[in-house]
Amino acid sequence: MARGAGIAALAGIALIGLAQANFLLFHTLVETFSVVVAFTIFVVAWNSRHFSDGHFFPWIGIAYLVVGTLDLLHAFSYKGIGLLGDGGANLPTQLWVTARYVEAVSWLLAILLERRQRLSHAHALGYGAALATGIAVAFGFDLVPDCYVEGQGMTGFKLASEYAVIALKVVTAGLVLRSGLHPRVRTLLVASLATGGAAEVVFTGYLSVFDFANQVGHLLKVAAFFFIYRATVETGLVEPYKLLFRRLQAAHDGLEVTVADRTRELARANEALAESNARLDALIKASPLAIIALDADRRVTLWNKSAERMFGVLAAGKLGRPLRPDVEANLGAMLASAYSGECVEGLETTLPRTGGGEAHVRVYCAPLLEADGTIAGVVTVNADIGGELAARQSLLDSQRRLSGILSSVSDAIITIDERGLIQSFNPAAEAVFGYGASEVIGRNVSILMQPADAALHDSYVRRYVETGSGRFLGAGPREFTARHKDGHEVLIDLQVNETVTAEGRLFIGVARDISARRRAAADKQALERELAQAHKMEALGNLAGGIAHEVNNMLVPIIGLADLTLRRAPPDLHANLGKILTAAERARDIVGRVLTFSRTEIPSRRPLHLGEALREAVRLLSVALPAAIDIRCRLDADPVVLADATEVQQVILNLATNAAHAMGPQGGVLDVGLRLEDTASGGGPSRQAVVTVADNGSGMDERTLSKIFEPFFTTKAVGKGTGMGLSVVHGIVSKWGGAIAVESRIGHGSTFTIRLPLHEAATAGDAA
């Protein structure tokens, strides 16, 4: 170490002396040393990059290739050499400053990126190419500011650049001290940065490119390059070889340990293999399955105790021999597949026993492979399934009996599991719900429920399974509204019970369709209500007819005398007498309607083309109703009925007037329609005429609908209606042999439907 320091001191003194005698020679030698060191750093760093753990030295090597090139150009262009440029001091100074910037920035980037995993050596090459390109462009287009002016010395840019380079080297030195580089390498790098920074400090103080400060700065530069050279050589050459020898020794030592460990492991593995083989042999002997192994020549190599019992032959009589020809023929396809490398499972067959009889077996067959994958033979595992077949047949018989019972039951029987999935669905269930068994088995039973019940069903079943709490289970039949496949409601009596099987709980639902019974009961109630209404209307008609007849007898003289008095009375009495006469005439009209309602004799009727009569009635409506009402008429037929044209107009006008009142002054839409409709009658189908009068008015509530056809019932204000219009309509339609019905909802308008029988003679004529 001391010797090296002495040599360095002597070299420094010699260089100072040379500088005093011939500065240009001194400068050329110093720059040549720097260039050689820079190129050497590149060569060493780049060729030893694969030994380096980080990216620091490859980046530094690329950077010093650029720095060495710039220093070489600096030496060639130095004042007094004149190989490049105009022989002045500005160009070499510009090249010097550029080289120092490249050096300082590259140091900083190299230490910052030293441990980045995603960087590669290609990035370092790219960085070098970018530097070279940038420098060439800067000097080619004269973009570098002046650094030295003859007669003035260094420019401000030159001084600022020196201080910037010093700052960068100070920051880099701090990062190097905190890096993970080898301590010896860190020391050399910090020494290079320190001497390089000192050189930049000295270069801020010279006035001439030949003065003493310039000489000292170049000597410090030599020292800086020497230190970075030492760091690169130690990292790129010396340390990798030391590390390589250490790794080889460690690998040798580790290999000896590994061989010893593997030897012990092999011994343990052999012991374990022997134990495993012993256990396997014991398992094969004790197995209830008949295990038989064949070699590549199809000769028996294994015949365990169960095979002896199953086929009645001892192992000694089978080992080394082929299988019986009839057995081989029975298993031929399976053995061929196994010898070709396939595993075959679950073949159920019968194999002959020695001494007579057959064994019902399920055979599994697989190839036996050598270590290299070649087929050494096959092994067959044979399970005696005689008892299983008997149990299976018994189960099939039981299932057929149960299926026959379920098919003959008239009630729907459905079973579901704990998940709510349908497991069985008998023919009666198919008839009730419209689904085939194949459509519903495996699906959730909620498809048979209304949406509100379906949403709760799964949680109900889950709660029962978890807590045992259930409302339906075990109770008597309950009415339940189910859902048919086509979407309509099905009313059923439902009873649910539970049973436990080996697979888990099953819930059994027994359902009886009571929809027809309910419809019959509803029809009976409707008929009873209609009969009561008819009796009520008949009684009201008789009562009203008697009263109306008496009132009419009293109104005749009142109207006659009032009219006579009005003709003879003075003018001042005309107004009051006119009101009396008007009221009496209104009372006469009401009495006339009551008499019409109560008249029980069959009026004279004749065959009438109903379509033509309705068309004429609608024509009258267009004049009688307000303009705000849009009258729409759709006559799809013109059937012949027994009726009176005047009465048809009276019926339509009454219904239309009520509709106009319901729609109010704002108006609305009035639809009048006529169509033919098939209806079941006696032994075959027949047809009837259907007249509809519909509006989009205010509609009626249930209470109003129940009284709509009663005499004197009105929804109008007092004095605005007689309450006889719809009762008269009802009476007229009834006398035609027809029926009238109404459908209405508040806010949705009303629809009156009149059904009339067709005239039989006309119908027969049409048929002919």
Image (tube, rainbow, N blue to C red):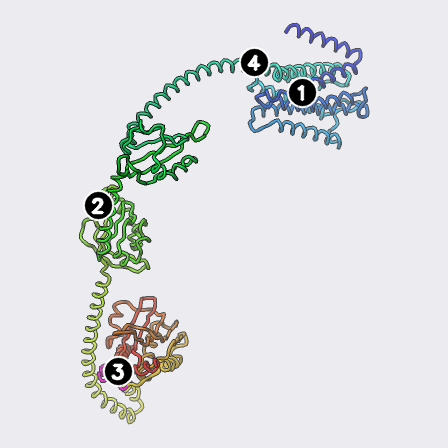
Q: Nearer the viewer, mark 3 or mark 1?
A: 1
Mark 4 or mark 3, which is nearer the start of the sequence? 4
Q: Which residue is mark 1?
A: 43
Residue occupying the point 70% across, 15% down: 222
Tell me which amino acid carries mark 2. Thr
Mark 1 or mark 3, which is nearer the start of the sequence? 1
Residue placed most toward the observer, 305 or 117:
305
Q: Nearer the viewer, mark 1 or mark 4?
A: 4
Percent from the top left, x then y, of residue 503? 26, 42
Q: Residue 245 got which mark?
A: 4
The local crowd at label 4, few if under 14, some if 14 to 19, many if 20 or more residues have their Cα within 10 Å, is few
In the depicted structure, whether residue 497 falls above or below residue 636:
above
In the depicted structure, whether residue 760 falls above or below residue 98:
below
User: How far apart are the two marked residues, 3 and 4, measured between alpha carbons?
Assistant: 131 Å
Q: Nearer the viewer, mark 1 or mark 2?
A: 2
Which residue range is magenta in the image? 592-604
Q: Toward which corner of the image does residue 707 lie, by quadrant? A: bottom left
User: How far apart are the two marked residues, 3 and 1, measured between alpha carbons?
Assistant: 128 Å
Residue placed most toward the observer, 105 or 204:
105
Percent from the top left, x then y, of residue 720? 30, 77
**Label 3 element class:** helix
Contact between marks 1 and 2 (CB within 8 A): the answer is no
Q: Left of 614 or right of it: where is 680?
A: left
User: How far apart are the two marked residues, 1 and 2, measured between alpha carbons?
Assistant: 89 Å
Q: Residue 593 got which mark?
A: 3
Q: Residue 499 got which mark?
A: 2
User: How far apart are the two marked residues, 2 and 3, measured between alpha carbons?
Assistant: 71 Å
Tell me which amino acid carries mark 4. Phe
Mark 4 or mark 1, which is nearer the start of the sequence? 1
In the depicted structure, whether residue 359 falls above or below residue 203:
below
